[in-house]
Structures are given as structure tokens and as C-alpha cells.
Image (spheres, rainbow, N blue to C red):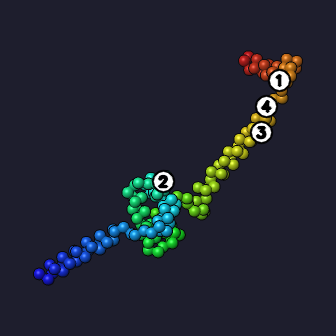
Amino acid sequence: MNRLCVACALLALAWVTSAWAQAPVPVDDALRARLAHLETELRCLVCQNQTLADSNAPLAEDLRREVRELASAGKSDDQIRDYLVARYGEFVLYKPRVRPLTWALWFGPFVLLAVGALAWWRAGRRRADAAPDDDPDPGTHDAPANDTALERAREALQ
């Protein structure tokens, strides 16, 4: 009988602690504003192009709850970001930090734009250098190069 009472008490205790662990964390106005700011800086891992604040995905709700719990536990914004980056990678940040790992992400578009502009400029210069001079009267000059080419073609055919 004692074992049955102890098992029931442990089961009740487990039920109460699980319900307590899932109870919503009380949020004051300052914490609510801080959480709203953090949720705009973090990316939904499912939607990929939405912040946690914009996403309705179940995983986004779990991440919002996790951020709320960390903030209520006294963690700073940087500690929360570092924890999420350690757990999910740099991808969780909506605006990744500038690091050697993310240089291509931050500076790649500007490098590609500069390379494209340089290629466009060089192609324009080559076209300008290769273009024949404008001749005001094209019928007044002889074309000896055309005559020699015609003679070579006749010799090749014989």
C-alpha cells in the first residue's frame, strides 16, 4: 500500500511540475518591448525569410517561448543571441554578424557589382578601339586589301 501511495505522489508531483514548466512566463512592459526587439533580430528556421515576430510556424512559437524563458531568467540580449547561434548556427540571426565566415555574404554583392562594372567598362573600351574611323565619303578611297584577298581566293580555287 505504501508503495502505491508513493508512486501516486510521485506521479502527481511529475504532473504538477510539468504543468508548471509549461506555464506562461509573466511578462512586464519592458520585457515585452525587449522580446519584440529580439524577435525582429532572429530568423524563423522554417520560413527562412521571416523574423520570429512575423512567423506563425510552430517552431517559431517554440523559439519565441525559449527566448522569453531565457530573458526571464536574466540573460542579456547578447547572451540569448550567443546561445541561439551556438545551438542553431549563424543562420538564426536575421542580420548575420560580420565575421570572416560571413564576408562573402556581406561583401560579395559589392565585389560582383565592381567586377561587372569593370568588365562593362573594358568591353566598351575594346569596342571603341576596334571600331573603324568614320569615313565621310566611303566611295572615294581604294581598297587594296580587298583586291589582295580576292586574288588569294582565286588562287586557292585553282
Q: Is residue 157 left or right of residue 2?
A: right
Residue that extends furthest to the front in the rendered view of this protein: 29
Q: Residues within 10 Å of mark 2 (few under 14, many from 20)?
A: some
Query: Where does residue 71 sit, x and y in percent of width and height?
Result: 46, 70
Query: Where does residue 76 sit, x and y in percent of width and height?
Result: 51, 72
**Which of the two residues, 40 or 110, is positioned nearer the viewer here?**
40
How far is disc 4 from disc 2 in space, using C-alphas?
51 Å
How far is disc 1 from disc 4 in space, using C-alphas?
18 Å
Number of the label disc, if any, that sits on residue 145: 1
Asked whether disc 3 touches disc 2, contact meaning CB atoms under 8 Å apart, the reply is no
Q: Circle 3 sits on which residue?
A: 125
Query: Where does residue 70 sit, x and y in percent of width and height?
Result: 44, 70
How far is disc 3 from disc 4 in space, using C-alphas?
10 Å
Number of the label disc, if any, that sits on residue 131: 4
Number of the label disc, if any, that sits on residue 50: 2
Sequence-wise first label, 2 or 1: 2
* Element marked by disc 1: helix
Asked if one can make out residue 141 in the rendered structure from this viewpoint, the answer is: yes
Sequence-wise first label, 3 or 1: 3
* Element marked by disc 3: helix
How far is disc 3 from disc 2 in space, using C-alphas?
44 Å
Q: Amino acid at mark 3?
A: Arg
Q: Amino acid at mark 2?
A: Gln
- At horizontal 83% and vertical 26% (from top left) the residue drawn is 134
Nearer the observer: mark 1 or 4; the answer is 4
